[in-house]
Amino acid sequence: MLAADVLEQLRELTVRARQRERVLGEWQMAGAASRRRGLTALFAGASGTGKTMAAEVVAGEMALDLYVVDLASVVDKYVGETEKNLDRIFVEAESVNGVLLFDEADALFGKRSEVADAHDRYANVEIAYLLQRMEMFEGIAILATNLRSNLDEAFARRLDTLIDFPEPEETDRLRLWDRCLGTAAPRAGDIDLAFLARAFKLSGGNIRNIAVAAGYYAAEAERPITMRDLVRATQREYRKLGHMVVESEFGEHYAALAGH
């Protein structure tokens, strides 16, 4: 589930995709830049806030396939190798009409506020090369990053669209809990979604993980999903995230964690 503002910006991105030939080609409204046909975007937000889902929405709206590239696996420690890897990806991508999502872009951005050595300087060259290839790509190319603050302003200005994905608010989390539990899985009467939404400031991805884990607990016991299942699964998710499990946050349900 995506925030209304994010959905509106995604709609604007698809409008750009549908109308770019007219605006940039026929009307030549971008001057020298009108020669480029690639559409570039950056999705910025914490893990689990819906960046991949958003790319799926764009691809679905345009009736295109989505191709996900893990940039962490592309970046090479040897000078020049990252560019070669990127080049291979774009050469292959030119043969398909789709949406390219470069996930884990932080592997390439890193912290660039200061250029400490030759490797940092070369990383800036790699970022510039990636953007150049994105602009030349005939389809839609999207970068996904968890670290918006590390993005160089000059780089951001060259993007067509930059969408921030906020952490969900309490009302959004309530809908996420309900959506992730679904309508097919049986629920016990003691489930308090309002408490879960209020107490735990989690992303959509985390909430989905918890709902699925709770489903497994219930399925193994051959009974409906209970509040205790959800609290236990939340404890597990907290530990994965490195969060402290404290009584003040879990409230009256803290006792359900005894022995787990």
Image (tube, helix red, strand yellow):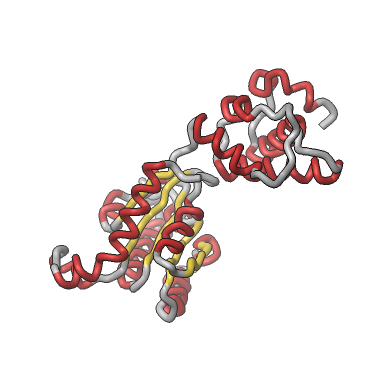
In the rendered view, would you say 44 is above or below 125? Answer: above
Placement of the C terminus among the 4 image quadrants = top right
Among the 4 quarters of the image, the one containing residue 31? bottom left
Where is residue 76 drawn, in percent x and y? 51, 66
Q: Specify whether 21 is left or right of 199.
A: left
Question: From the viewer's perspective, is residue 48 above or below residue 40?
Answer: above
Image spot of residue 88 (x, y percent):
46, 77
Q: Quadrant of residue 21?
A: bottom left
| For residue 239, side relative to residue 124 (left or right) | right
Is residue 114 visible in the rendered structure shown here?
A: no
Give the camera-side residue of 200 and 22.
Answer: 22
Asked if one can make out residue 156 in the rendered structure from this viewpoint, the answer is: yes
Identify whether 139 is placed above or below 234. Answer: below
At 25% from the left edge and 65% from the top edge, which residue is drawn?
Answer: 19
Provide residue 234's location: percent of width, then percent of height: 69, 35
User: What residue do we see at 85% from left, 43% from top?
Assistant: 222
Seen from this angle, which residue lies furthest bottom? 95
Residue nearest the viewer, comparing 171 with 247:
171
Image mark count: 0
Coordinates of residue 50 in the picture (x, y in percent): 50, 48
Residue at 26 percent across and 53 percent down: it is 157
Q: Picture quarter containing residue 129?
A: bottom left
* Residue at figure coordinates x 27%, y 58% from the top left: 158
